[in-house]
Image: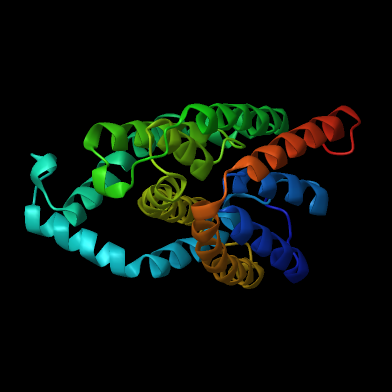
């Protein structure tokens, strides 16, 4: 197994800021971390770093939605079963929609784990995914009715969005990108699509982060003496992510995703150019 690269506090700070900015935006945090780490020290940051750095955004998103999550959890406990969801109150429905919508990602995450950690992490795959999802998002913006909010979200549409989340296993696709895109296709307005995307992210990135930490500790029993830089990255990522979530929900009330579409295509093309000219490998 290739040892994880040594990361300085300065590099951890840069990567933490980048993780916090991109974790919940439809631009793919995985793509940015892969590209940045390759430029900073010529290698992938490694599973241990990714696991720790992801803790910050997890805490940030839970803190931001803490009141909502409390209501949804109470709704789940009150109803005890997802049967007859149509007759349940909004809090119970959104709670169950979030849980049920996360199951496809968890199942396929386990089934495709080896490919996700190897083949899918190719920078060529990242570049094509950045561009490909941007083109699909253009289509969603064009045909999506954008007239419904979360109050009228039903099980069928929430499951469509949840199944779309599986595509996020391909680096560059972006978990928030594919779920927001699916939400627009399902007729949700932009803010509601973003909000449900964030709700789905909570169990998804929490489970992924804790699983990665457990796997790293099982394989090496430590974080290679770099716990300090790793924790710095996590704290910085969490603070930045909290600010970004608040900004993004406000942004989506008034704006389309055009800026993110242009950015994804530009980054994908730049990455392809860097790969072809061997600036990055």
Instruction: Work out whether residue 165 can be spotted.
Output: no
Q: Quadrant of the C terminus?
A: top right
Which residue is located at x 69 percent, y 60 percent? 15
Which one is nearer the viewer's eye here, 122 or 47? 122
Q: Residue at x 53, y 29 (%)?
A: 142
Seen in the picture, residue 154 relative to 211 is either above or below; the reply is: above
Image quadrant where residue 6 sits: bottom right
**107 and 242: which one is in front?**
242
In the picture shown, does residue 198 fall above or below 165?
below
Figure check: 275 above or below 258: above
Instruction: Name the residue rendered at 57%, 35% in the picture.
Output: 173
Q: Position of residue 37 (x, y in %)?
A: 74, 51
Image coordinates of residue 160 in percent, x first then y, are 34, 31
Residue 225 in picture, x, y percent from top left: 64, 67
**Closer-to-camera residue (31/161):** 161
Q: Is residue 275 visible?
A: yes
Total marks shown come to 0
Figure colour scheme: rainbow
Q: Does residue 215 appear to the left or right of 196 in the view shown? A: right
Residue in front for this viewpoint, 187 or 105: 187
* 46 lies left or right of 109: right
Could you say which quadrant of the image residue 102 lies in? top left
Locate the N terminus by quadrant.
top right
| Residue 32 relative to residue 24: left or right | right
């Amino acid at each position: 197994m290739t040892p994880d690269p040594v990361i300085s506090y300065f590099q951890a700070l840069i990567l933490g800021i980048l993780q916090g900015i991109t974790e919940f935006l439809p631009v793919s945090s995985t793509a940015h971390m892969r590209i940045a780490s390759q430029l900073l020290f010529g290698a992938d940051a490694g599973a241990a770093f990714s696991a720790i750095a992801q803790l910050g955004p997890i805490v940030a998103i839970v803190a931001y939605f803490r009141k909502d999550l409390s209501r949804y959890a109470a709704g789940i406990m009150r109803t005890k079963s997802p049967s007859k969801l149509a007759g349940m109150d909004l809090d119970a429905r959104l709670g169950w929609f979030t849980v049920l919508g996360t199951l496809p990602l968890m199942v396929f995450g386990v089934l495709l784990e080896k490919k996700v950690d190897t083949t899918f992490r190719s920078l060529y795959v990242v570049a094509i995914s950045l561009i490909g999802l941007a083109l699909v998002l253009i289509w969603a913006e064009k045909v999506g009715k954008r007239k419904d909010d979360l109050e009228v979200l039903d099980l069928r549409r929430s499951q469509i969005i949840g199944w779309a989340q599986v595509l996020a296993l391909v680096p560059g696709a972006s978990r928030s990108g594919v779920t927001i895109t699916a939400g627009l296709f399902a007729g949700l307005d932009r803010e509601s699509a973003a909000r449900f995307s964030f709700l789905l992210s909570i169990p998804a990135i929490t489970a992924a982060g804790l699983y990665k930490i457990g796997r790293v500790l099982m394989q090496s029993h430590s974080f290679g003496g770099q716990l300090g830089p790793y924790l710095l990255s996590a704290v910085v990522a969490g603070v930045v992510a909290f600010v970004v979530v608040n900004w993004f929900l406000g942004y989506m009330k008034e704006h389309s995703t055009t800026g993110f579409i242009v950015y994804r295509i530009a980054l994908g093309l730049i990455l392809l150019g860097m790969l072809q000219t061997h600036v990055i490998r």
